[in-house]
Image: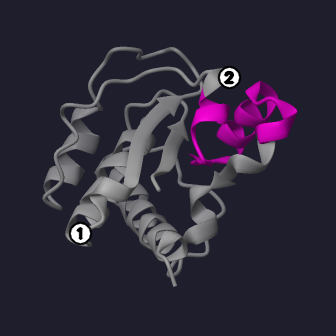
Amino acid sequence: MTTRLLFVCMGNICRSPTAEGVFAHLVTQAGCADQFELDSAGTHDYHVGHAPDPRAQAHAAAKGIDISHLRARQLTEADFEHFDRVLVMDDHNWKAAQALAPIEYRSRIHRLTEYCQRFKAMNVPDPYYGGDAGFARAMDIIEDGCRGLLDDLKPA
């Protein structure tokens, strides 16, 4: 059975493509990539069709993860039916996803930080307007959340 996961942030060029890339990397290392369908999207259409932010790409590449091939797209109502879990990065994404999702699929929306094991963050902070330290912090929280998510999804 394939588990379908969608990672969501605002513009789909920083946090959500990073999370998609990190999770893909983790499942490849774990030998279970064929058990997952992964994608990412943004709640807004600011960057549709664009590659991830060069700073996000650089931080991912430093961990051996290539996200350069990903392209931004906007979250759609159909995503909530297709994906088993929609993993949002912050409160703004949560509210936007809840507003767009049909009622019967709202339970599929989770914060990625729910799965963090090391960090006690409620949100993955948006690094877009910040410097290098913001991208490093976002990467740390994303890696933690993705590891916890994979642990949660592994069969017992």
Task: Name the residue located 22 percent from the left edge and 41 percent from the top edge.
Answer: 67
Residue 94 shows in this picture: yes
Judge whether 133 appears above or below 75 on screen: below
Residue 13 lies left or right of residue 53; in this view the side is right
Q: Which of marks 1 and 2 is in front?
A: 1
Label 1's element? loop
Q: Position of residue 84 (x, y in %)?
A: 60, 48
Query: Which disc, if any, is residue 95?
Result: none
Q: Where is mark 1, residue-wise? A: 31
Front-most of 103 and 12?
Answer: 103
Residue that numbered label 2 is attached to: 77
Callout 1 crowding tier (Cα within 10 Å): few <14, some 14–19, many ≥20: few
Q: What main secondary structure does the magenta stretch of the protein show?
A: helix
- The answer to whether residue 129 shows anywhere in this view is no
Task: Examine the rendered structure and indicate whether residue 121 appears above or below residue 10.
Answer: below
The residue stretch that appears in magenta: 79-105
Disc 2 element: helix
